[in-house]
Image (spheres, rainbow, N blue to C red):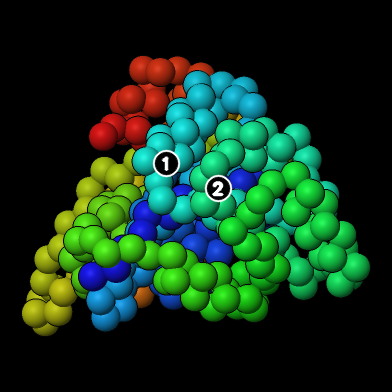
Amino acid sequence: MKTAFITVCGRANVGKSTLMNALIGEKVSIISDKPQTTRNKITGIYNAPDVQLVFIDTPGVLVPKNKLGEHMLKEVNEALDEVDIILLVAECRKPGMQEHNLLERFKGQTVILVLNKVDKVPKKDVAEAIMAYSQIFDFRSIIPTSALRNDGVKIVLDELLALAEEGPAYYPEDTYTSQTVRQMVSEIVREKILRNMYDEIPHGIAVEPIIFKERENKNGEPVTDVIMNIICERETHKGMIIGKNGQMLKKMASQARQDMEKLLDTKVYLECHVKVKENWRDSEKLITELGLYDE
Ligand SMILES: Nc1nc2c(ncn2[C@@H]2O[C@H](COP(=O)(O)OP(=O)(O)OP(=O)(O)O)[C@@H](O)[C@H]2O)c(=O)[nH]1
Ligand SMILES: [Mg+2]
């Protein structure tokens, strides 16, 4: 068996989660166009005969503005400990402060630089970025990709497979994530809020699973009952999330339900309740109560 532990890191919104999902071929991490979509270390597992690659997707590196931000940074730091290979994901431009700081810390480690979103820039920008990065760090390789269009992803995968070393499989060969179903279902709801809400609202959301239960309906078919609390930071945010006549919440819940039905392969009854917990992002007690970082 050949294996490798790979941490996917970089600044917020560069496409780390999109890349990991594309590498694995499954939707493991949620994705949105808002920075700070990923809040936890998320393990994604690539399995093929005699090889297992264990990826850890991480929150975008940021200067913490609150207790939640501190937890997110801690997740990045933990994911960078005892890892075999680092995938540094960046956009096709010259390295900025975040990238310089990370590379300073990666000295002597095996780092593959993924220059993502090549579909958005002229070729000359890609070439300039490659030049600029290769002058500041000895990368194992530099690979331009469009994770969104699945361009270059196979090259990254082949490079990782070539670097995998003899070792035991860490996860059963039929799993593609170590997240629990409850976690995945909560993340689906958060993704829909991130995609439909703007400004400060999406950043101040947490999703708390209240009930998650499989049963059979009267025709003997499997159904899953899911009840979620959507936590937001202000009464005004609550109003926007629910929307006029409840339309916004209904729309987001319907999008979430469809994803859950695909994930669980059962019919899903989803109920979402919106609650206000003022400034929960700055309260260690509320973050703990919400179970966002209990391990
Ligand atoms: N044009 C283009 N957009 C991309 C590409 N890869 C990702 N995106 C988009 O970039 C946005 C951010 O993608 P994510 O995968 O959530 O980024 P991330 O780095 O995981 O972000 P955080 O978790 O917030 O740190 C989404 O809107 C993606 O659809 C790409 O190759 N090309
Ligand atoms: Mg992410």
User: Please, what secondary structure does the residue beneath circle 1 have?
Assistant: helix
Give the mark, 1 or 2, whose residue is nearer the N terminus.
Answer: 2
Q: Classify mark 2 as within 8 Å of ligand 1 or not, answering yes or no.
A: no
**In front: 265, or 255?**
265
Identify the residue at image location x=90%, y=68%.
124
Vertical arrangement, residue 286 with respect to residue 155, above or below: above
The residue type indicated by label 1 comes to: Ala
Look at the numbered discs 1 and 2 and tell me whether their residues touch, using CB distance below 8 Å: yes
Q: Residue 48's image quarter?
A: bottom left
User: Please, what secondary structure does the residue beneath circle 2 have?
Assistant: strand
Instruction: Judge the density around disc 2: few (<14), some (14-19), many (≥20) Cα neighbours within 10 Å.
Output: many
Residue 176 in view (yes/no): no
**Quadrant of the frame with the C terminus:** top left
How far across and down, in percent of the image, does residue 5 sit?
A: 37, 54
Gap in Å between the C-alphas at discs 1 and 2? 9 Å
Please name the residue that numbered disc 2 is placed on: 9
Please name the residue that numbered disc 1 is placed on: 79
**Quadrant of the frame with the N terminus:** bottom left
How far across and down, in percent of the image, does residue 183 sit?
A: 32, 50
Q: Residue 100's image quarter?
A: top right
**In front: 129, or 214?**
129
Residue 3 in view (yes/no): yes
| Left or right relative to 265: residue 238 | right
Identify the residue at image location x=40%, y=37%.
81
**In front: 173, or 284?**
173
Identify the residue at image location x=46%, y=53%.
85
**In front: 86, or 242?**
86
How far across and down, in percent of the image, does residue 2 sit?
A: 29, 68
How far across and down, in percent of the image, does residue 279 sit?
A: 53, 21
The residue type indicated by label 2 comes to: Cys
Instruction: Judge the density around disc 1: few (<14), some (14-19), many (≥20) Cα neighbours within 10 Å.
Output: many
